[in-house]
Amino acid sequence: MVVVMSPDASDPQIDAVVARVREVGGEAFVSRGLHRTIVGLIGDVDDFRALNLRGMPGVADIIQVSTPYKLVSADHQPGRSTVQVGADSGVPPVTIGPGTFALIAGPCAVESLDQTLEAAAMAKAAGAALLRGGAFKPRTSPQEFQGLGKAGLRILAEAREATGMPVVTEVIDPSDVGLVSTYADMLQVGARNMQNYALLQAVGAAGRPVLLKRGIQATVEEWLMAAEYVAQRGNLDIVLCERGIRTFETSTRTTLDISAVPVVQRLSHLPVIVDPTHSAGRRELVLPLARSAIAVGADGILVDVHADPDNALCEGQQALAGADVRELASALRRLVPATERQPAAPDAVD
Amino acid sequence: MVVVMSPDASDPQIDAVVARVREVGGEAFVSRGLHRTIVGLIGDVDDFRALNLRGMPGVADIIQVSTPYKLVSADHQPGRSTVQVGADSGVPPVTIGPGTFALIAGPCAVESLDQTLEAAAMAKAAGAALLRGGAFKPRTSPQEFQGLGKAGLRILAEAREATGMPVVTEVIDPSDVGLVSTYADMLQVGARNMQNYALLQAVGAAGRPVLLKRGIQATVEEWLMAAEYVAQRGNLDIVLCERGIRTFETSTRTTLDISAVPVVQRLSHLPVIVDPTHSAGRRELVLPLARSAIAVGADGILVDVHADPDNALCEGQQALAGADVRELASALRRLVPATERQPAAPDAVD
Amino acid sequence: MVVVMSPDASDPQIDAVVARVREVGGEAFVSRGLHRTIVGLIGDVDDFRALNLRGMPGVADIIQVSTPYKLVSADHQPGRSTVQVGADSGVPPVTIGPGTFALIAGPCAVESLDQTLEAAAMAKAAGAALLRGGAFKPRTSPQEFQGLGKAGLRILAEAREATGMPVVTEVIDPSDVGLVSTYADMLQVGARNMQNYALLQAVGAAGRPVLLKRGIQATVEEWLMAAEYVAQRGNLDIVLCERGIRTFETSTRTTLDISAVPVVQRLSHLPVIVDPTHSAGRRELVLPLARSAIAVGADGILVDVHADPDNALCEGQQALAGADVRELASALRRLVPATERQPAAPDAVD
Amino acid sequence: MVVVMSPDASDPQIDAVVARVREVGGEAFVSRGLHRTIVGLIGDVDDFRALNLRGMPGVADIIQVSTPYKLVSADHQPGRSTVQVGADSGVPPVTIGPGTFALIAGPCAVESLDQTLEAAAMAKAAGAALLRGGAFKPRTSPQEFQGLGKAGLRILAEAREATGMPVVTEVIDPSDVGLVSTYADMLQVGARNMQNYALLQAVGAAGRPVLLKRGIQATVEEWLMAAEYVAQRGNLDIVLCERGIRTFETSTRTTLDISAVPVVQRLSHLPVIVDPTHSAGRRELVLPLARSAIAVGADGILVDVHADPDNALCEGQQALAGADVRELASALRRLVPATERQPAAPDAVD
């Protein structure tokens, strides 16, 4: 941490900063420049943060040098992590992480058993390793379909049986975490809830892998701090998911921050995947964005598929169907090997 | 709602759109232009939304003409609303809305009884009508102070007794809404939770006025849809609070969207206030932004005050103290009458 | 300047940074922390910038401590500057800066002599000190009205004669700077040209005061660097104009960054005004935003007025007319004194 | 174009809109809904735009249905365009467009003949079809290296001779367009000048292909309107270049809007390439972003290379060198065929 003093800071003000740092056992190195003095701090950042140094007289700015997250940081663990999903699910588990590429696919919302089984079959045929599907749907408008709830979870569990794919589904209320954990193999925290700390702590304590979507307003640093909330409860089985950020551009629903993938892979050991469907909000962009996610080096993608998107209850305009799903499968076959990975597949039985 | 067809849409594609609209009882007017055809829809927007028109072949775009919120819309109610806070609190209630200007002030976080009483006294001396203070604190980093919880609520209730000001405090977990409602007169939903629908529904059902902060990523329309979630549970006692949006500018923590105040006052009947403290994140900007909020026509402001900001446990660098609080009071005295309002004050006893 | 090394930077890498800094005569202080080492640099920032330190092995980040602008910086000059406009114009000059508030008003585009004289009369009646009007119009679409050019400049000069107000007008091509300087008293650089360095240098050399609008994409720091380009040519008669930045919010054309006014007043000695008209793009928001600009402490505002906005050739939907202009005058009379300034007026003749 | 009336618009107000549209020969279809009336307009959008309909009483909003650009629109031309660069350059020309992928590489700034020849050799070895290099550099800070000017152009021409690659270079002042056209085969308009209309018109008239970078603040629509300015001067040899937009995220210099590539390819017939170097601003992100640009379907990429980036005068921290250039070449060899294109190469001599 570096304290930047104002150009007009007095010596007693500088001394006061140094004294306050030393009170908590830190060291402070004063460098006097032509225009300003800076004070470099050595010690525990968490201690320093409680000192309100920014509010002290003569202090112009505080610069964070170390990252505010620890457990999820690349410094914390050599090499990149893998996350196993579905360990006790009755179907072969799947591993997400370096060396493989995971397609996660399924319907935006679970509407019925038939619709879910159809979408799951499409997903599997395209090479999916995991099945996604929403039982609890957070919707911007209270008039929109909010999901089937527990009935939806049961359908997902049936689809897992039928297809052999572990299931990931979203949880939106901390009090539902137990229920959702009973049925699902991986808990998704959606973009709107990325800073819902009650929920982050609840999923952190649930003993299930977590898929943590980036909030559309969140910096990469805030996203990793949200992951840290989960990790602090003892759960490091976290897969990050970039799904677009809010910008001024309106030709897409959000702007897919494709650069975030290599940025996160340098800052954190966690796997990171991309959701081209929700980022773009338009079916015709899903395939090119999926290809770009594979090539940039993401550890997987999350894609909506639906057998009859015209009649979907949720986001039908962005779900892939028919020929598009086959083209996605073809892109995976060509591009995953070209980026020196292989498709994620059920873990071999020992 | 207007359906814009692609330039190359065929007649059968246009007919299919018209047929689908008529199936749900809507009317569709087709206007054929030089390059494109547009279809104007008349009927219930909620019915149309379920039709997935955007996903139909030949459809280029769907344009919403009416607003997606109803209860909170200016169309729903003639004139602007007032919200009464503290009706059964044992202290005189306060009314927020047109014709008055409400100062809401207090510490960012409740740290102790003494600290809270000191800050409350400062707030009252500056002309505050309501006391704010955080017992449950959502923090970006899990290392930071998370609030005193229930003990903090008790302290706030004592401060209400001592000062006669009704109390507003944040709730962050749906399961705490009952507890917080026992102590507080107004429930704050913070910016990070603006799209936490479980929480919105819980506060909507709690029978307490709600202070709904705008998410830093939220458009005005999404903010009003969040208010609609609360209103749908039968609670129209909602005060909106602009607190800055996330932009590229880094010289302030967020960018105060001062234009949102007159925009919201045209779109909705609800009162709207401004939080200059959390928007700027820097003490020296709070006073100019508070003045700008008064002059733009906001119905109030929310300001952090602290007797000893250097030792505050939360956001000390942005709390007003001492001379700054007196200058705030002076600005209120000059500018509130100059914008033809009077300070909000405890309602006269009948 | 502070060099932040990577956690895994080696000693030889650190030594290489220190050696490179010393080569150009700088000093480097090394502080070794638990996780990282930082190197504080003392000396001429411009020398350091040429060193490509960011590209050296082991370097994680470079943190700028001092500002990249000098002449326009608050450190460069004690107190805030005033800018005199119209010194050799044949009409009494006007001074913009602390202690006064300048209304600058007129039509968006000069369309004809009559239209300009009418708008100028409205402006003067409302208390304007300067007349604005566009002769060269930068338009997003090549189909839109591009201005009258030289004929427009002549009309502005006639309007100056008729009303006694000095004239500010935009210049968009470096090769027009001489021509525009012949007719206008202040040269406006528009938001789209804020980083048009050829133009900045040309207006810097022209010997006329400059009104420098902030680019809708520009940080406050970049805006001040653009002003530095002008200042380096020997011209410090610069007035900054905040006119909204581009954000995700679409209910206004741009988002007025009202906080930028107090931020700039702390970073720079230059006067700063606000353009509520172009920021909002909607007439009904101009008055509230004008009030907020006065109250925040801006040194002036720039407002479009037009006698017949329904038939304006440029941005008629945002020009004030009739009762709105009178209400603007009334707001100025109430709020300028309430913020302890007086209206800018023609300088008294000695 | 659709005119949306306010909910409280009166019949005479609606009639006035219809009458005004008919005055200019347009047709207006009135659809009366439950809450609002909308008026669909048929005719010439340019005529309607001059009507100031948005400013008329009772009008709530104007919705553009057709695009504001024509010549560059996908509707204007069946199929996607190709742009030939270097037709009269003395070296074999190169074609950019569908079916091929063009690597454009070279130094950020021309510093000397040797440095340019070295970088050009690296570029050629990596498979580049065109050489880039800056002779006129627009720099945010006036303290930074501004380029060699005419001497730089001569060096580029020598490098073209030596390597057989046509040359693209930036022009920043309309008065330099003639000079730059004498030496360069393609004129680059930089991001900061995307709305510098004087410059757009000058390059449009110069008879050279144009590389038009997207402004960091520009929507896709505004970018295409800037291209329309060029096209209106009779020049449709335009290649668009996405180079990142400004967002709140600070871990990269700008946020590469990878989605813009397929979006533009649907809206316009012009080729579109990606500049991963300037978007990211950090060398370690260039390779993953280059891969993502290939896979998304861009028609090429623009990459900085430098033989000695540690001593580069411009942006050394982002230039590729040594092993990174070889890895880029390898990525091109694997991914270009996997997306069913072939590398752009000098056109075969007839």
Image (spheres, coloured by chain):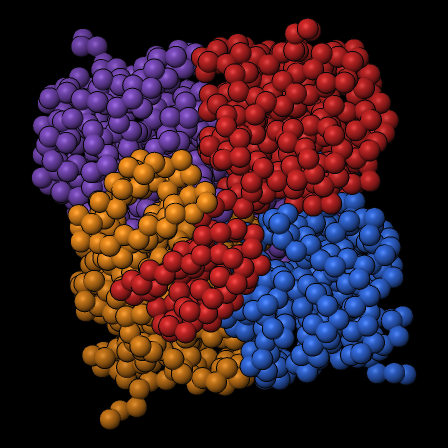
Chain colours: A blue, B red, C purple, D orange
Q: Nearer the viewer, residue A111 or A136?
A: A111
In the orientation shown, which residue stands out farthest toward the bottom? D350
Residue at (16, 26) in percent of width and height: C118
Q: Is residue B122 above or below residue C257?
A: above
Q: Quadrant of residue C341?
A: top left
Looking at the rendered image, the quarter that the C terminus of chain B falls into is top right
Left or right of A190 in this view: C246: left
Q: Position of residue A217 (x, y in %)?
A: 59, 48
Residue C317 in view here: no
Q: Nearer the viewer, residue C180 or B160?
A: B160
Q: Position of residue C251 (x, y in %)?
A: 45, 41
Q: Is residue A291 above or below residue C11?
A: below
Q: Is residue D130 above or below residue B343?
A: below
Q: Quadrant of residue B309?
A: top right
Q: Position of residue A189 (x, y in %)?
A: 73, 55
Residue at (55, 81) in percent of width and height: A323
Residue at (53, 69) in percent of width and height: A283
Q: Is residue C192 above or below residue D291?
A: above
